[in-house]
Image (tube, rainbow, N blue to C red):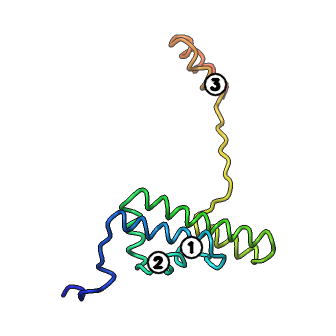
Amino acid sequence: MGAPKGNRYTQKYTEDQAIELFVKAAEYAINDKECLSVQDAVIHIDIPHSTFYDLAEKHKVLDNIKKEINNAVIARINKGALLNKMNATAAIWRSKQLGEADKTENTNVVNDNVALLKLLSPADRKKRIKELIKNL
């Protein structure tokens, strides 16, 4: 049995209609100090969450607007924690739930012997490998 007529879960949106809704959600997320989640912004524009995420996945421009909503929420949460208006631990946890990540550093270690071997001629390379094995 299909969904009843007028069911908002079956409503179809053109890309232009969706852009208008997403921009409205973004403006709400940026301007309303009470907006602390993407879900708050979606509730404000009164479309189903599944529709919102489906549209964002379908259209790159909508996904970018969704990311802007997310960034506005993260910025608000971070600012609230820094100004002691929000619990810092809860703010960090919430930010991580929204996709923020700890800084990561990658260190590439190159084995000097491997780098040197690449520079040698095949005959010298074979000789050097034998020396390295002998010294193990």
> Which quadrant: the C terminus?
top right
Residue beneath label 2, please?
Answer: 45
Question: What's the distance in space between the residues labelled 2 and 1, CA to CA?
Answer: 9 Å
Residue plotted at (68% across, 71% down):
77
Nearest-to-viewer mark from 2 and 3? 2
Give the answer, above or below, for where 112 lies relative to 106.
above
Residue 56 quadrant: bottom left
* Precedes in sequence: disc 2 or disc 3: 2
Q: Secondary structure at mark 2?
A: helix
Contact, CB < 8 Å: mark 2 with mark 3?
Answer: no
Nearest-to-viewer mark from 1 and 3? 1
Question: What's the distance in space between the residues labelled 2 and 3, CA to CA?
Answer: 61 Å
Which mark identifies residue 90?
none
Residue beneath label 3, please?
Answer: 113
Contact, CB < 8 Å: mark 2 with mark 1?
Answer: yes
Q: Amino acid at mark 1?
A: Tyr
**Residue 55 place in picture, x, y as percent:** 38, 67
Residue beneath label 1, please?
Answer: 28
Q: Amino acid at mark 2?
A: Ile
Query: Relative to residue 129, is residue 46 drawn left or right?
Result: left
Question: What's the distance in space between the residues labelled 1 and 3, CA to CA?
Answer: 58 Å
Give the answer, above or below, for where 67 lies relative to 109.
below
Which of these two is toward me, 26 or 2? Answer: 26
Give the answer, above or below, for where 84 lies relative to 124.
below
**Residue 124 place in picture, x, y as percent:** 56, 11
Instruction: Give the number of callouts.
Output: 3
